Image (spheres, rainbow, N blue to C red):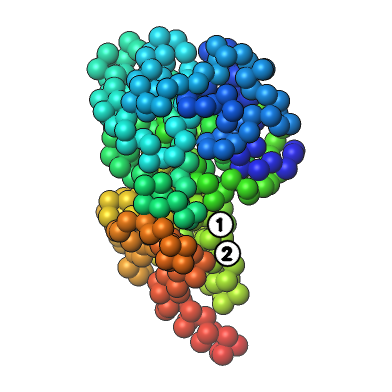
């Protein structure tokens, strides 16, 4: 085990995959300088070594500044035998290649009757919370959840960043990885040995009995802090991190809600048609009889992201807003526990 940062774990996963399979390549804008851990401003020279020197420019390829061209080239490379990892930097840059994503990357395996696979990973960073303004603060994973044929991951820890990326690279389907830049500096012990976190399997971050808290991406650390606050008040919070949004581990969420009877969902994306909305609908449709209180979502509001640091801080789920939602849905539980303490 080695203490790795989130970015370091991504770099380690890429290095392992490239060592294991020479079909794995990395392409993108200025990746010769950014490929270690990258997206955006990472450095290739590190304890992992220089990627360009290690693998050569045939496998580390800079591209023109054309997202549509990058995504189209990666799709063609994947269909003809390579396994590209594409660094698209800011997640808002994905919009420029929507036609390629929706009509080529997502559909070609189906359109060719399975004769061609699409083993390609698209990495992008969500730069929300860093005062990068409306054009660079997007969290666009919900809109891609609506496109059949795409798999979507949103790792929240260094270990998951490494394990999920290894599984994504090995997948024969296209995978979009949305990486919250607020997590880049987080560190934990990560195995030095290769390992894979299966796509479509959620992680129970914390066991609990009174309320289920599903937290996504950068909301997970805030959820952990909020759950600790509630524990001090006698309320037991179970935290589920889906890790993979498509395919979603529906059973893990439904099992947890069946146990706790309550659900709060926290995510940094907008409220309308977000992952939180989908998870809430899933529970309302398939676990309604288990619910003891209404479902509560804690999300960003449906508005553009302000440049002002003080205003932007109010946009995303925090320890305080998640805690308030947990207290709201467990009000009866809190009263009952207080009464029980008095009775004893």
Name, please, the residue furthest toward the bottom.
Answer: 342
Task: Inspect this view and state whether residue 248 appears.
Answer: no
For residue 115, side relative to residue 165 (left or right): left
The residue drawn where x is 35% and y is 70% is: 293
The residue singled out by tag 2 in the image is: 225
Count neighbours of disc 1 (C-alpha within 10 A) and say few if under 14, some if 14 to 19, many if 20 or more.
some
SS for dot 1: helix
Name above or below for residue 150 compared with residue 17. Answer: below
- Location of residue 71 in the rendering, given as x and y in whole percent from the top left corner: 37, 24
Q: Secondary structure at mark 2?
A: helix
Front position in the image: 9 or 288: 9
Q: Is residue 89 above or below residue 65?
A: below
Task: Give the image quarter of residue 247.
Answer: top left
Residue name at image x 41 percent, y 46 percent = 136
Image point (53%, 37%), residue name: 40
Q: Is residue 192 left or right of residue 267?
A: right
* Cα distance in 3D space between marks 2 and 1: 7 Å
Number of other residues with Cα within 10 Å of mark 2, as a class: few under 14, some 14 to 19, many 20 or more: some
* Viewer-nearest residue: 210 or 68: 68
Label 1: which residue?
A: 221
Residue 9, x across and y down, in percent:
63, 36
Answer above or below: position of 280 versus 62: below
- Residue 43 occupies which quadrant of the picture? top right
Q: Residue placed at 52% from the left, 27% from the top?
A: 30
């Amino acid at each position: 085990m080695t203490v790795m940062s989130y970015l370091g774990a991504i770099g380690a996963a890429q290095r392992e995959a490239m060592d294991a399979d020479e079909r794995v390549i990395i392409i993108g804008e200025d990746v010769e300088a950014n490929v270690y851990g990258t997206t955006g401003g990472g450095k290739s020279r590190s304890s992992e070594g220089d990627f360009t020197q290690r693998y050569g420019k045939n496998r580390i390829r800079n591209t023109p500044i054309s997202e549509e061209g990058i995504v189209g080239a990666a799709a063609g490379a994947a269909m003809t035998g390579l396994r590209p990892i594409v660094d698209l930097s800011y997640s808002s840059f994905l919009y420029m290649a929507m036609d390629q994503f929706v009509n080529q990357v997502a559909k070609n395996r189906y359109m060719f009757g399975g004769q061609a696979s699409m083993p390609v990973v698209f990495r992008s960073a969500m730069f929300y919370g860093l005062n990068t303004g409306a054009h660079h603060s997007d969290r666009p994973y919900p809109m891609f959840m609506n496109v059949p044929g795409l798999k979507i991951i949103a790792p929240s820890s260094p270990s998951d960043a490494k394990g999920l990326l290894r599984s994504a690279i090995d997948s024969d389907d296209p995978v979009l990885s949305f990486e919250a830049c607020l997590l880049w500096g987080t560190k934990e012990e990560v195995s030095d040995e290769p390992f894979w976190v299966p796509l479509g399997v959620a992680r129970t971050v914390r066991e609990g009995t009174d309320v289920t808290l599903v937290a996504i991406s950068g909301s997970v650390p805030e959820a952990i802090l909020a759950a600790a606050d509630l524990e001090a008040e006698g309320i037991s919070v179970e935290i589920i991190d889906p890790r993979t949004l498509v395919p979603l581990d529906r059973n893990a969420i439904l099992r947890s809600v069946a146990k706790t009877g309550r659900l709060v969902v926290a995510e940094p994306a907008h409220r309308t048609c977000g992952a939180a909305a989908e998870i809430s609908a899933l529970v309302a449709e398939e676990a309604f009889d288990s619910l003891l209180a209404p479902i509560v979502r804690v999300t960003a509001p449906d508005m553009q992201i302000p440049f002002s640091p003080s205003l932007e801080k109010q946009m995303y789920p925090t320890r305080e807003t998640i805690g308030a939602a947990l207290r709201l849905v467990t009000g009866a539980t809190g009263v009952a526990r207080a009464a029980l303490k008095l009775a004893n």
